[in-house]
Image (cartoon, rainbow, N blue to C red):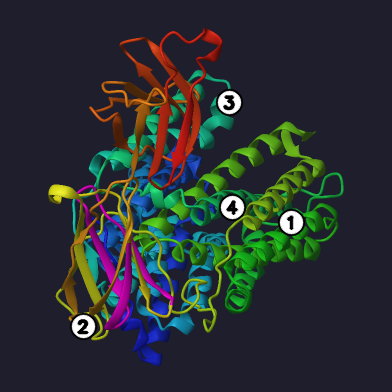
Amino acid sequence: MQLRVPQGNQRTAKPKRTSLVITILCLAGTVVALQQTMVVPLLPDFPGILNTSPENTSWLVTITLLTSAIATPIISRLADMYGKRRMMVIAMITMVIGSVIAAAGGSLLTLLVGRAFQGLAASLIPVGISIMRDELPREKVASAVALMSATLGIGSALGLPLAGLIYQSFGWQTIFWVSAVVGVLLIIAVIMVVPESSLRTKGKFDAVGALLLTAALTSLLLAISKGGHWGWSSEPVILLFLGTAVLLAFWFPYELKVSQPMVDLRTSARKPVLLTNIASILVGFSMYANMLSTTQQLQLPNVGGYGFGLSIVIAGLCMVPSGLAMVALAPISALITKRYGAKITLIVGGLVLAVSYVARVFLTGEVWMVVLGATFVSMGTAIAYAAMPTLIMRSVPITETASANGLNSLLRAVGTSTMSAVVGVVLTSAVVHVGPLALPTEDAFKTVFWYAAIAALLSIAVAVFIPRVQTAPGMTPGTVSGIYAPDPRAVSSKPVTERATEPATENEILVNGTVTGPHLRPIKQAVVNALHTNGEPADWSRADNEGRYSLILPDSGRYLLVSSADGWTPSSQVLEFADPTSWHDIHLAHRLMLSGRVSDGAVPLAGAMVTLTKTTGEFVMSTFSNDEGLYEVPLPPVGRYILTGLDPQVQTSTSLSVLLTARSATIDLCLPAAGKPPALLSGNASVRP
């Protein structure tokens, strides 16, 4: 069951330690991102080195993509449950193990195994972002998150020239040995500098959901990444897409049913989270065109007036300004977020992306033009990437920050994988033949840039509909997650909380309890909202299937607790909390009911049947009136229904369309008396609140 991680330590963190935490986390993110591109300069030579085919060596990139996509949501979820620093260290250990296996093996098989382990470390970035929210002072979080988000682009941009230089100077094994050594040093630094989570999830890991998601992601990403090689209409690709659909068809209802899901779909379906994730796919799709096409454009031989014939190392060095631009834009992104909100930051990033790609269509004549266009694309990417974790974290519970950011990173990977497939199709469909070579035309690159610009514009269109945070009188924009201080936290599922051995701050109050109905039966998915008595939100939570909930209150004092659940009358009460850990059970005493009286106009009808059906034809429920003609049933979900009354003795009936809202309703049914002409058998009803 999910819980909240307190932010108390971040309020009193020392400036020197804060800067060191940011530095270590960002270095770790950059090193992990380097793993994605470190073998790219070696791909042309690996077939000869390993005595295999180019198709086989392409799996050195594909396997890392697959394992990183699979590991990101799983490791992120485990981080919320068992400690963020712990899972971050485990992710880095897998990177070190993979690097050693790849360096020492010397065969295609050992390289594939090593690259698979290296891919597992990609989950480190969303986990690191969640650590920043937990541990850093509020005023430092926005800029730190922006910088951590940019490490993906920084590492990818620096990976090409660094790997190329090391390869040419010391051999390909040295690349992996350097990765292993740097990984060990960073593991030591993380253990010494980064604090561990003080509150963790207490519950059972959703192994079935993880397995289903793993199978679905493997099938989807394998189809996308290999569709160009195998053929988009080939049987393997079609079967993979069908398998993805079937697996997700099982996964979605299972995640909604299980008490402690791998991915909280209810939270993910909230409008701010859902729209941010959709925008993430589009931004990932857009930005990856820059990563894939720029070095190819620079390396093409000067045929037809658009190639430059640069070496892989020089072409990689041309990407360094892009990486540096992402570092430089981190504080600017944070400033936009602090002043205007994360939604505006995402829109600005998408706009810069779109304009930059349109410019790239026309800036193709000189190397400096290509580099300048690529740099501006990276700037837009940095701004947009900085906004997404902020938008996610303001809308999910604090203990779901790692898993929610992991899902967001996963969806970005889906976008980048899709763009990779699109680039492969476009650049191989429009070619010019130069001797035995088939080189992509200039128009092929321009087509890719137009696709990327359209995706960026679509991300803006999606971002426009992300709800803005409303400020209450006397509240000022906060910087923790684009929220207003004190930051309201979003709905939490399954939340019984336990403290780790080290305490949080002295001020924070941990409140656990259960929400029950009559006979102390638990009410699942009940929502408990805690507000300050001046109206400012403090925290809120959603109970698990056993009715258990958890709240983290920022300080001792009086709070208004508002509790509600589908089908139940809400309750509210003012309570004072002083102890660091408190237990408060909530009782919802009254169900919302649909009731009324059935009569023939004058006499109540006993034993009359009352049925409720949907306007689309589905049966909902039925009951019978008592001796006084009264009926009562639990209120169904909000919507329009057909309410029907039937007198079984004289076989007269009446029906009417009713609109039921989230409040009890009384609807009286008047059946026509026996012997009335059929034309008069219309009946009537009276509705009372």
Do the numbered discs 1 and 4 sit on residues whose CB atoms are within 8 Å? Answer: no
Along the viewing direction, whichever of 428 and 575 lies nearer the viewer: 575
Q: Count neighbours of disc 4 (C-alpha within 10 A) and say few if under 14, some if 14 to 19, many if 20 or more.
A: many
Upstream in sequence: badge 2 or badge 1: 1
Packing grade of label 1 (10 A; few <14, some 14-19, many >=20) is many
Image coordinates of residue 21 in percent, x first then y, are 38, 80
- Residue 579, image quadrant: bottom left
Q: Earlier in the sequence, mark 1 or mark 3?
A: 3
Eye-nearest disc, 2 or 3: 2
Q: Residues within 10 Å of mark 2 (few under 14, many from 20)?
A: some
- The residue at the far front in this view is 602
* Residue where numbered disc 4 is placed: 279
| Above-or-below relation of 454 to 79 | above
Q: Which residue is mark 1?
A: 354
Q: From the viewer's perspective, is 593 left or right of 174?
A: left
Spatial CA distance of label 2 from label 3 is 62 Å
Q: Which residue is mark 2?
A: 578
Residue drawn at point x = 83 percent, y = 60 percent: 366
- Whole-angstrom CA distance, mark 1 to mark 4, is 14 Å
In front of the other: label 2 or label 1? 2
In the image, the segment drawn in magenta is 535-562
Q: Position of residue 273 (x, y in %)?
A: 49, 55
Q: Who comes first in sequence, dot 2 or dot 3?
A: 3
Mark 2 → mark 1, Cα distance in angstroms: 52 Å
Q: Is residue 467 above or below residue 475?
A: above
- Residue bearing mark 3: 232
Q: Nearer the viewer, residue 46 or 316?
A: 316
Task: Say which element carries label 4.
Answer: helix
SS state under label 3: loop
